[in-house]
Amino acid sequence: MRVRITSAKALIAASALVVLAACGSGGSSSSSGSAAPAGAPIRGGNLVFDALQDAQSMNNTTVFDNNSIWIFEQIFQPLYTVTNNGKGVEPWLATSYTMSPDKKSYTFKLRPGVKFSNGKPMTSADVKFSIDQDRKAKGGWDFLDLAIASVDDPSPGTVVIHLKYPWAPLLADLSIFANGIVPNNYDGQTEAQFYTHPIGTGPFMWDYWHKGQALKLVRNPYYWQRGKPYLNSVTWEDVPSDNTRELNLKGGQAQIDQTPAWSTVDSLKTTPGVTMSLFPSTQTNYLAFNEHRKPFGDVHVRRAISFAINRAALVKAVLFGNGKPANSLLPPQVPFYQAATQGLQFDLTAAKAEMAKSSVPHGFSTEIIVPSGNSDYITIATILQAELKPLGIKLNISELDPNTVNNDEQHFKYDMVLTLWTMDIPDPDELTYFAVDPQGGASSFFTFYNNPTVVKDTVAAEKTTDPAARQSFYNVVQADAAADAFMAFLYYSPYPYASTSNVHGFFVTPLGNMHMEDVWLSK
Amino acid sequence: MTFVFQRLLMLIPVAIGVTIVVFFMIHLIPGDPASTILGIHATPKAVAFLHHEWGLDRPLVSQYWLFMDRLVHGNLGQSLYYSAPAASIIATRVPATLWLVVYAAILAIAISVPLAMIAASRKDGVRDHVVRAVPLVGLGMPPFWLAILLIYAFAITVHWFPTSGYGAGFFGHLHSMFLPALVVAIALAPVVIRALRASMLNVLGAEYITTAKSKGVPAPQLFLRHVLRNAVIPAVTVLGINIGFLIGGTVIIENVFAIPGIGQLMISSIFQRDFPVVQGVTLVFGVLVVMVNLLADLSYAALDPRVRFDR
């Protein structure tokens, strides 16, 4: 008897997989938190964080992925850190600074007694090396250090940063994880070797990373804040399913769900044993228009669409009421945010008047690209479709896989696209440089928006250190950007985090930073 | 042995075919790994820098040759997402999927064999109808839903099993993977039960069974030694084919139970356009499917001495 089994089965199975890829996943969020401390902190325990997806890399100078950032922020610490309200900085590995009269040199005093997790003391040579590495990180976070001319280390406890020109956001830039301090020369290793088991001054140090499964950090015995961290260890587990993260929390297998679905937030608020936190964030969702595609070069069309969007309805449908309509390019948790900027809010009469003034008074047909599987974005697109109808705009929704959507956006192959932003530094410059300055490298958030007045004020705000002067520049930027409607500002959402009620001291800043050294578990 | 050798040789064209199809398919669909890595920060300058680093700025054909050249030397390339060797990433993910598939197959057999015997022992009787009908409910239930029900029942209400995860060590895996394997087994069992029952009924009608009965062979012995052994080959074929598909199809179960298997890796790599990993995983799938089929073939000879793999 001859048994024949064809190799076609292998191919069929392989292609079945490719087809499976059509089902999507998506959505991301940042952090939140404020479990009120109950009694004196207890030392010990392992805290399990359920994350939507795996980290990508521990290289703090090149990685943009939030899942990686939130982890390596527990290992690497910067000279200054973001305050809890997200609007300023406070001394961290530096204790103070002085500025030269020409505002082009900053001298920092380093915090004494800080050691790396390998027991070696941190000195100015480590700081110089770290910042220089970030300045060299091509395609990474180097753009935040562009104003720096050089870094000097005149004595072990002193660092001097020389600027090319006066630069207001310097301290904010230094507070980013990318300027976190690593040992000089990567402690004798290559960059690639170092980041497979990184060393820092943070509360936790490296244990293991089983890619696609879990990453564990353990207590740094040399940590400089006396008595901290309270936890013995923190483990980030990759749990892609929303349902499973929730079940893990209820079953006590995890203590924090990093991204509960918006639809579950209300029920989690009343679930016994669970603390549902919504931390104010800098996350802002936008609808972007490609000005190189007709008719979006016409300001009246963009304004008409912006007026036609009922933002309160979006907040209700997408965030289940847990957010606020956006009025400005900047979110409320960013310094120099202007609450008085009204923006273009829902007003159908104004929308129709703008359409009448436009190049397409009788409407037109257009397309919005949305990532398949991202139910939030699909909901927004569906609402937009209905809201634009009265203007004679026929909106086609094109669902593509998430990577294709990103790629099409970055290559300007779209009419309209939904996008979002979260801040990494407590200064509007990171966002304005990217969003309204065509020289920022991304053609103004991939829209081709170019208003010379807005660009001029943005650049002026960077180089002015006087807060009042900066505020007035940013007021104009916010008002003009809203009036130009280069993007429709949709809504501000908080960071949802669900935790078991024995988690205490968990807090997330509007930028997403978490101080895991303050967290403890009660029995 | 010649047969086994031939079948192993067949792996080569299968593997090459799989690499060609996957390589060009994944490169021809829109998307870009740089979009994943850089996200909103994907300025043209940063994208160009990464493309150059990864060699994606070279012509597609030369990229394919480079891939094949590396492959011949046992190198699957670097994961673009993790910046680590693709082979080591895949190697760490294969055991979880194998665990799931093998565990599920064992559970499926453990469920199917007794039930098929019960059904076949009284054709068209009540027990036959019950066995044929009830497991179909398992086949009809969406696996992710069944999974959540089982987690609620056995991990949250009573803490018999963990809610998710792969566990550590042999017994850890055995414990953690029980519910996921059971979900797969419940979907697999009805098909195997039907195949086994049908072929058992065939065998039961054979003359040698009548002879055995007339000689007074006791029922349990009759079923185990004569009926089951002769009836099992079609069921093995069904199981083999289904396991072949399972290797690629466990992704939903891996997702719900947060099991770090290759199904999950495949999906995330496709989303990330992590070309070397997608290519590597597909290759592994191809090889595994061929191997499972080979094992099914070999088991025929073990089960039935009349089966010979002659040319």
Image (cartoon, coloured by chain):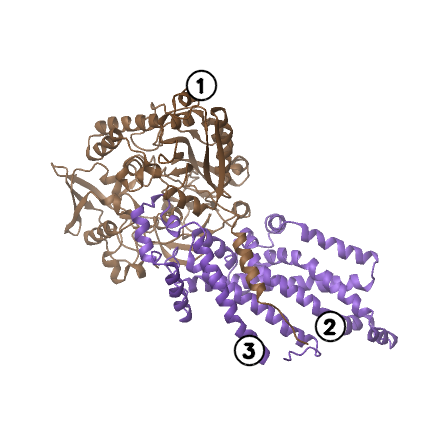
Residue A320 appears in the rendering = no
Disc nearer the start of the sequence (3/2): 3
Q: Mark 3: few, some, or many residues within 10 Å (few <14, many ≥20)?
A: few
Indicate the amino acid at tag 3: Phe
Residue A111 in the figure: left or right of residue A371: left
Q: Nearer the viewer, mark 3 or mark 2?
A: 3
**Mark 2 and mark 1: span between their CA atoms?**
80 Å
**Dividing the picture into quarters, in which one does residue A487 lie?**
top left
What is the x, y in percent for residue A462? 22, 35
Indicate the amino acid at tag 2: Arg
Mark 2 lies on residue:
B229
- Asked if the residue at tag 2 contacts the one at tag 3, i.e. Cβ–Cβ closer than 8 Å, the answer is no
- Asked if the residue at tag 1 contacts the one at tag 2, i.e. Cβ–Cβ closer than 8 Å, the answer is no
Determine which of the numbered discs, if any, sits on residue B5 in the image.
3
Q: Nearer the viewer, residue B27 or A273?
A: B27
Q: Secondary structure at mark 1?
A: helix
Labels 3 and 2 positioned on one and the same chain: yes
Tint of chain A: brown
Q: Mark 1: few, some, or many residues within 10 Å (few <14, many ≥20)?
A: few
Query: Which of the chains is purple?
Result: B
Q: Secondary structure at mark 2?
A: helix
